[in-house]
Structures are given as structure tokens and as C-alpha cells.
Amino acid sequence: MIEVNDVHKSFGKVPAVRGVTFALEPGQVAGLLGPNGAGKTTTIRMIAGFLSPDQGSVRIQGYDTLDQPLHARRRLGYLPEAAPLYTDMRVEEYLHYRGKLFQMDRRTRMAAVSRVVDRCWLTDVRKRRISKLSKGFKQRVGLASALLHNPPALILDEPTNGLDPSQMRETRRLIRELSVDRTMLISTHILSEVERLCDRALIVAGGVLLADGSPSGLVASAQASAMYIIQVHRTKPGDDARVYKMWQSLPFVVDVQPDQPDRSSLLTGWSLWMLTARPGAPDLRESIANAAYQAGLLVRELKRESATLERVFLSLIEGSESTRDLAARETQAQHEEAEKRADANEASLRTSRDLVTRDLVSNAEEGNR
Amino acid sequence: MRAPLLSTAGTIAARELGSYFRSPAGWIILALYLFLTGIIFALSTLSPGSIASLRDVFAVSGWLLLPIAPAITMRLIADELKSGTIEPLLAAPVSSAALVLGKFAGAFGFMAALFVPTVAHAAILFNISDPKPDFGPILAGYLCLMLVGSMYLSIGLLASCVTNNSTLAFMTSFFAILAFLFAGAGAQFVPEALTSPLLSLAIGPRIGDFSRGVIDTSHIAFFVSLSALCLLLCVCVMEWRRWR
């Protein structure tokens, strides 16, 4: 239904999209995920025909957006970010105008306007001027105009951006209803939205497609490197080094990080640890609990953190060279300013944790000697 | 593709025309134009001993339309670019040619609406003057208004295509039109080689001919071809925006 084949797009010397390829089957709902500046909107604009790719091709129901642009656009509904509308028009008037642009005759247009007004819950505001509507209603008008010609494919760019929680819930409900009989591509940076609405997730960063799969499939693949959180009670000051060594000696554990519990827990002698298991390791909760028991440690909490799409997303984004490349292309001034801010924030956030880690490592070394 | 091009352009033109009358700016432009033409008509034609013609009104039309045409066109595409409404518009089956043609036709329709009330001036002239004025120069004058207006609007539309700032679009088109108005006067200050091309671009003498009732096809061709050139450039700019 939507075929994106090796598309590239640069703005001046800055590449925005680099070789993105995917195909959406009829009825599929895909979420295009990525941080700000990842190339989501540029990709979507190329699919919608608003921008032309420098290289590669986009096909909508077999029609190339460059060779047969008008045919391709007739088969696509598009809701741009922030739903830009002619605010001087009334809701119904605007929808009729959009219908005329899609060459709908009067009878078809009347029926279509009535259908989308009903479907997008706009009946009460159909005669109202768009400038007088709330942001949520404006979003619905944008969605109604995208649905007017009953397109088999629908593209929504940040459909819940800037909406309040109740408006978000309503918009999601509407999207879920619409997804029953059409192919949809939803661009968002809200991960929970993809988990709730989409049966496929496309993760982009730095203009490159980093992952493509079902949200549950991506999460399952990340389960291979599970994380365990354990909170134990320190009986004496030197205990942290001993505990640290003990966790490290456990089979399948590849990384141990001390974390900071809440202030009251810290003062009363509780310490929090995050243990990362080797990919493919079995459930380690029993061996961790047993090790704590053998060491005479009182355990207050032990949980295996189930992998989420957020973790998959973050690990992909942080590990992506493309993100770093893109950042390197930022202007020097912006770069320096961002670095300064990041350094200051990081320093203030990590001070306490670093102190704990340094203390643990030095104690461990002393113990070794 | 001819029928969809024209019907799409018609749809866009109708929306644009409606939007002028929905906004206070449209009514202010209308009032300003009628006020200025009314003043000129009263001073030049209604004063005792004046010739029974609208010649003076049409002769200054080039200057009268100088602030009016950029005010009409400044927001046509610049506002769409700024507000983002251009995105759903170009994602619909709308070609760049249909978009430009529709925007131009909408602006032209509004400009024609500005001229309609001035027919009252001709009616007054026919009622109060004896002998009655010649009908030909008045028709030639209205043809002149349409042609000069088209050229100004197409320059303004081009300025509106290249920026998303409507004030900048106004200023750009204002000074571009001013350059055409001063081209004749400026010809004496340039090297001899440039005199002829500059004189051929001057619009003052052409408007003068029309206001005297002279309909010269070369003048018509000049205004029509310049308007068409600007509209073609608009289409190129809109296509370039997709490829940039």
C-alpha cells in the first residue's frame, strides 16, 4: 500500500533522511518513532508528496509520487503536525473546500462531509468558525479533512502533539477506530502511543531506519538482556564493596551499577543495585536472592525489569552512530552551548552517584590487596 | 488534465475571494481604494470647467494601484507558508500551476470587485455632463486598469511565493512595481545602451495611451506577457519548494 524505497533527502549539506526503506501492507498500522530531528517529518512529507526525495521512490497503492503525483495523492489522507487549517473558514465550509480539491461532485461531497463530521465528533461545531475552536477540535477537523475522500492510506504526523490528556485519549480512540479498515502511518515520539495503537514500529534516528518490527517483537528481542533491580540493607560501611563484588561474581551478570534509593532509604542503610544480565541468560532472580541470603543481606526488593519499547528505543538511539553524526553537523555555536548545558546538568546529577561508585571501587581494590 | 487544473484553480480562487471579504483587511483595502479614486474623481472631473472624461482617474491608476496590489497579494502564499496550510494543500491533488492560477484568479477577482463601485463615477459623469462623454476612452480605461492590475498582482504573487513573511512580500512587490513606474524617468540617467530597454519596460506611457482611449495591441501584449512570465516564475518557485 505504501512503499518507501531507499529515499534520501538533504537540506543544503545537511542530510535529513538517508536510505529509508519500508513497505506497509493493506490494513497495517505503523508507528514512525524517533527523537526530534530524526527525519520523521521529512520522511512523512515525502510520502505525502509535499517534498520530493533526492533519491529513491515512494509509491502509494502502486502510484509513484513523482511520476503520477495526483493519482498518488488521491489515495492518501494526510494530517500534518499541528493540523494547519484556514481559521477564517467554518468547519463545514472548510470540509467542502477540501472535497472540491479532491474533485468530489456535490452529492458525494455532501455525503462525505456528513460522514466525517459524524465520525470525528464534529456535529456540534460544524457551523462554527475554525478560529474559535479548541486545539483538540482543530485536530479533529484536520483529521476529518484527511478522511474526507475515504483514502485507503492515512498518514498522521504527531496527531496528539499539544493535546491535553482527555483530548489525547479521544484522538487515540478515534485513530483506533479508523485503523480498522485502512493502512496508517503515525509519526510520534510518544512510545506508549505506538504500543497502544500500532502493530508495527519503525524507529528512525539521524535519518536512518534503525529498527523495523512489531512493538512486542522489538521488546522480546530486548528481553535477552534483562535488568534486575535489588535493594538490600547495609549492615556496616564497608558492606557496599563486598556486595558489589558479590554481584559481579554471579554467573550471567555482565554489569553492576549502584543506584541511589530515595533519601530516607539511604539514611537508614538501604542500597539499590541494578544488575544487567548477559543476553540469553535465564531468569536470575533466584540466584540473586540466594546470593543475598548466603551473604546475610536483608532484601527489601527484587524485581526483573521487563523490557519496554522505551528501553529498546533508548538503546537504539543512544547506540546509533547516525545520531552522533547528525549532532556533529550542528553549528559550532549550538554545539558548544549544548555541551556546556549537558555537562553542567550531568555533573550535578551524577555527583552523588559517582561518589558512591568511587568509594565502592576503592574499597574493592583495598579488599583485593 | 485541463479540466481538473481549471476546476481546482477555480476552487482555490473562490476560497481566496471569500477570504478577502471575511477579513477586515479586505474591506480596508476596498475602502482605501474607493476613497482615493473618489478624491481624484472629485478634484479632476467634478471641478468647474473640467473636461467630461475619466482620463485623469485612469492616468493615475498606475500609482493608485501601487500600494493596493501588493496589499492584496502579500499574504496569498506567504501566509500559507508561514501557517503551514500549504502542506495539506500541496498534499491534495493540486498541481503548482493550479495553485498559482487559483491564487491569481482570486486576487484578480477581488481587484475587479474594487473597480465595480467606480462605475458610479462614469454614471455620475454621464448624468451631469453635457455633451455626454465618449464611451470608448472609458472602456479603454477599464481595460487598462485590468491589465495594469494583472501585472501588479502577478509581481505581488511572485514576491509572496519567495518568502513566508507577508510584510517582506509587500515591500518587495511595492519596490518592484515602483521600478517599473520609474523606468521611463530613469532612462535619461543610464548609459545609452540601456535607454531603449528601460523605455520599453516603462509603464507610464502605456497607461497614458489607454487613458486617452488608445488601445495599442503592443501594450496589451506587454502587460499580458509580463503577467504570464511572473505567474510562470511562481509555478517554478512552487516546484522548487518541493525539490529544495
Image: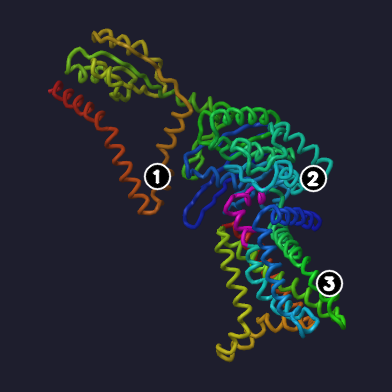
Spot occupied by residue B200 in the image (x, y as percentages of width and height) = 67, 84
Q: Which mark is residue B123?
A: 3
User: Which residue type does callout 3 highlight?
Assistant: Ala
Question: Label 1 amino acid?
Answer: Arg
Q: Is residue A335 left or right of residue A15?
A: left
In the image, residue A272 sits, relative to residue B41, either above or below, namely: above
Q: Which mark's residue is nearer the viewer, 3 or 2?
A: 3
Mark carried by residue A324: 1
Q: Residue furthest left?
A: A369
Q: Is residue B77 magenta?
A: yes
Residue at 74%, 49% (x, y): give it.
Answer: A101
Check the picture and name the quadrant holding the C terminus of chain A.
top left
Q: Is residue A165 left or right of residue B149?
A: left
Q: CA distance from mark 3 to mark 2?
A: 43 Å
**Which residue extends farthest front?**
B48
- Which residue is drawn at the image coordinates 60% and 75% (left, top)? B178
| Way the structure is coloured | rainbow
Provide the residue span drawn in magenta.
Answer: B74-91
User: Foreground: A55 or B11?
Assistant: B11
The residue at which mark 2 appears reads as: A104
Q: Give the distance between the C-alpha atoms of the residues marked 1 and 3, in whole angstroms.
A: 74 Å
Of the residues under marks 2 and 1, which one precedes in the sequence?
Answer: 2
| Amino acid at the residue labelled 2 | Met
